[in-house]
Image: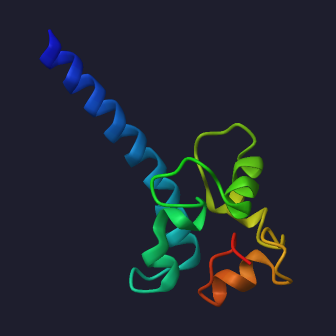
Amino acid sequence: MKRILVCIAIASMVTGAVGMSSYFRVFKSTYGVQSSSRLGKAQCLVCHRSTGSKKLNAYGRDVRRALGGKRTLTSSILGMIERLDSAGSGKTNIQKIHADQLPGVK
């Protein structure tokens, strides 16, 4: 019984991580991000404050608001926040993405 519970717990953690990585796949394909680029290497840090953290940076919070309770991220949802300056850096999110910079960081 203990073995089954451990397997279920591990499967739940992996499923959650895989689900969120699907957000990065959508981001990557929407903007043609190469794995070798700064954004490509950043992966979860595009939206999160630190690796393994659930805390979102400014861009991640704008993505969450644009999702409006939906669980599936799409290119059109990302498009809704392209013209925002999530980090307050003076550059729009899309300008930062095209410059291979993290949109949620000043």
Foreground residue, 10 or 19? 10
Residue positioned 55% across, 47% down in the render: 54
Does residue 13 appear to the left or right of 101 in the view shown? left
Q: Position of residue 81 (x, y in %)?
A: 78, 64
**Picture quadrant of residue 82:** bottom right
Q: Position of residue 57 (x, y in %)?
A: 67, 60
Total residue callouts: 0
Give the left or right position of residue 72, taking residue 96 as reference: left
Report the colour scheme. Answer: rainbow
- Looking at the image, which is closer to me, 62 or 79? 62
Outermost top residue = 1
* Figure check: 102 above or below 1: below
What residue is drawn where x is 32% and y is 41%? 14
Q: Looking at this view, name the residue that lies furthest to the bottom.
A: 99
Q: Residue at x 48, y 73 (%)?
A: 42
Q: Closest to the observer: 34 or 76?
A: 34
- Quarter in which the N terminus is drawn: top left
Q: Is residue 63 above or below residue 32?
A: above
Q: Work out whether residue 99 or residue 76 is closer to the camera in this orientation and state it.
A: 99
Is 77 located above or below residue 96 in the figure? above
Residue 31 appears at what percent x and percent y? 58, 77
Q: Residue at x 72, y 53 (%)?
A: 61
Expressed as whole percent of the image width and height from the top left, the position of residue 62 reads 76, 57
Q: Quadrant of the C terminus?
A: bottom right
Q: Is residue 104 left or right of residue 3?
A: right
Left or right: 104 as drawn, with respect to 13: right
Quadrant of residue 2 in the image? top left
